[in-house]
Image (spheres, helix red, strand yellow):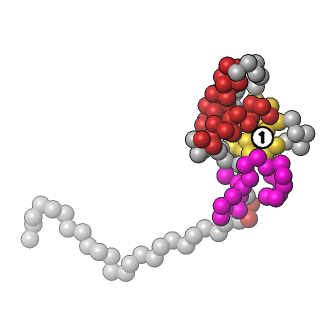
């Protein structure tokens, strides 16, 4: 009986789903880049990002003179913003270290990074705010 509609047959044996590929322990490691800015500039950007509910993990540097935002790995290749530096890699502090400005939280074992381009926007806005308040240039 030809109806002009192709007739499809169901396979006799349902196909088994493919087995998941084994995940090595190296593939589970989450890597970050760090965007570092002066403390005053960084804290203003943290406030802006928190209002937007877009702030990932943020830590204070060992010297205490700068704020380091964790961003996705690969950001350092494309980052160009005066008043900041983006370096590949990040040294993560223990979760209970007091230098965390925004500590890792939730059920994830790794800190959540801040979206790099949302961070860029917040840093520009923070610089404008600081300059308007007479605290700039950075």
Residue 32 visible? The answer is no
Residue 92 placement (x, y as % from top left): 80, 52
Classify residue 123 by image quadrant. top right
Q: Is residue 97 magenta?
A: yes
Give the residue displayed 74% in from the left and 53% down from the top: 103
Foreground pick, 24 / 96: 96
- Indicate the position of residue 16 as horizontal and vertical percent values: 46, 76
| Outermost residue toward the front in this view | 133
Q: Answer yes or no: is residue 125 visible.
A: yes
Q: Quadrant of the C terminus?
A: top right
Please state if 64 lies on the left or on the right of 111 as rendered: right
**Quadrant position of the N terminus in the picture:** bottom left
Q: Considering only vertical position in the picture, is 114 above or below 41?
A: below
Please tell me whether residue 20 is drawn above or below residue 37 in the rendered image.
Answer: below
The part of the image, by quadrant, that contains residue 111 is bottom right
Residue at the image point whose x is 63% and y is 33% from the top:
122
Q: Within 10 angstroms of label 1, few (less than 14), some, or many (20 or more) residues?
A: many
Q: Main secondary structure of the magenta part?
A: loop
Residue at image location 71% in from the left, 62% down from the top: 109
From the top left corner, tell me how far across and down residue 108 is, in percent: 66, 61
Residue that mark 1 sits on: 68
Q: Is residue 92 above or below residue 79?
A: below
């Amino acid at each position: 009986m030809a109806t002009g509609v192709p007739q499809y047959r169901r396979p006799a044996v349902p196909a088994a789903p493919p087995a998941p590929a084994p995940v090595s322990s190296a593939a589970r490691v989450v890597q970050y880049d760090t965007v570092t800015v002066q403390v005053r500039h960084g804290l203003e950007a943290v406030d802006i990002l928190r209002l937007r509910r877009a702030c990932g993990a943020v830590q204070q540097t060992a010297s205490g003179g700068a704020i380091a935002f964790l961003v996705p790995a690969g950001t350092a290749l494309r980052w160009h913003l005066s008043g900041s530096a983006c370096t590949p890699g990040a040294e993560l502090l223990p979760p209970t270290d007091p230098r965390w400005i925004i500590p890792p939280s939730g059920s994830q074992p790794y800190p959540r990074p801040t979206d790099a381009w949302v961070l860029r926007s917040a840093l520009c806005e923070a610089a404008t705010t600081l300059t308007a308040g007479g605290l700039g240039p950075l």
